[in-house]
Amino acid sequence: MSVEILDGATIVNFLEDEEAFSAQICDRFAHLDSDHDGRLSYGEMLKELQCLRLLETHFGVDVETDPDELALVYGSLFVQFDHDLNGTVDLEEFKSETKQMMLVMASGMGFLPVQMVLEEDSFLKKAVEWESAKLVA
């Protein structure tokens, strides 16, 4: 993990760079697709969903969460990705929903810089790295 400064523009600009965003999506999708069938099952997506840590922390401190509640939340999130409801998530569904989630984060964050602790492999961290590389170039 690292502490980074970002704002909504960091995320939006990263998403607008289709080449950079698509490359990150393809890398993450390939990493998650453990059976290499071009689709993500619930089991393959679960680890990614768990990384979101939606209900497991309170201001960064782990809290006890009912496993049934977590399963319900993760199942609901999986359905959000599975646009055609065929029980798997393809690359385009993964890309589309990830982009929508990141746009919601950008909107909620606004355009005033905030300091955040980011997981090293998160899409937000990738957006910060992309922005930093653009500033150096």
Image (cartoon, rainbow, N blue to C red):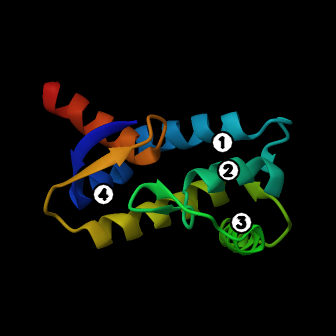
Query: In this rendering, which labeled residue sits more in front, label 2 or label 1?
Result: 1
Residue at horizontal 41 percent and vertical 55 percent from the top: 60
Q: Which residue is mark 4?
A: 12
Disc 2, disc 1: CB below 8 Å? yes
Q: CA distance from mark 2 to mark 4?
A: 20 Å
Residue 3's spot in the image, x, y percent?
28, 40
Q: Secondary structure at mark 2?
A: helix
Q: Number of marks in the image?
A: 4
Give the mark, 2 or 4, whose residue is nearer the N terminus: 4
Nearest the eye: 121 or 61: 61
Which amino acid, by three-letter code, is at mark 2?
Answer: Leu
User: Which numbered dot is residue 91?
Assistant: 2
Query: Which amino acid type corresponds to the residue marked 4 in the rendered image?
Result: Val
Report the mark closest to the observer, 4 or 3: 3
Q: Position of residue 37 (x, y in %)?
A: 85, 40
Instruction: Identify the secondary structure beneath mark 4.
Output: helix
Q: How far, Cα to Cα, is label 4 from label 1?
A: 21 Å
Q: Residues within 10 Å of mark 3 (few under 14, many from 20)?
A: many
Q: Are marks 3 and 1 in contact (CB under 8 Å)?
A: no
Name the residue: 55% across, 58% down: 53
Describe residue 84's horizontal placement relative to residue 48 as left or right: right
Vertical relation: 96 (above or below) 5: below
Q: CA distance from mark 3 to mark 1?
A: 14 Å
Q: Are marks 2 and 4 in contact (CB under 8 Å)?
A: no
Q: Nearer the viewer, residue 74 or 102?
A: 74
Residue that label 3 marks: 78
Q: Nearer the viewer, residue 122 or 18?
A: 122
10 Å neighbourhood of mark 1: few (<14), some, or many (≥20)? many
User: Residue 117, image x and y in percent?
Assistant: 34, 46
Question: Any mark on residue 29, and which?
Answer: 1
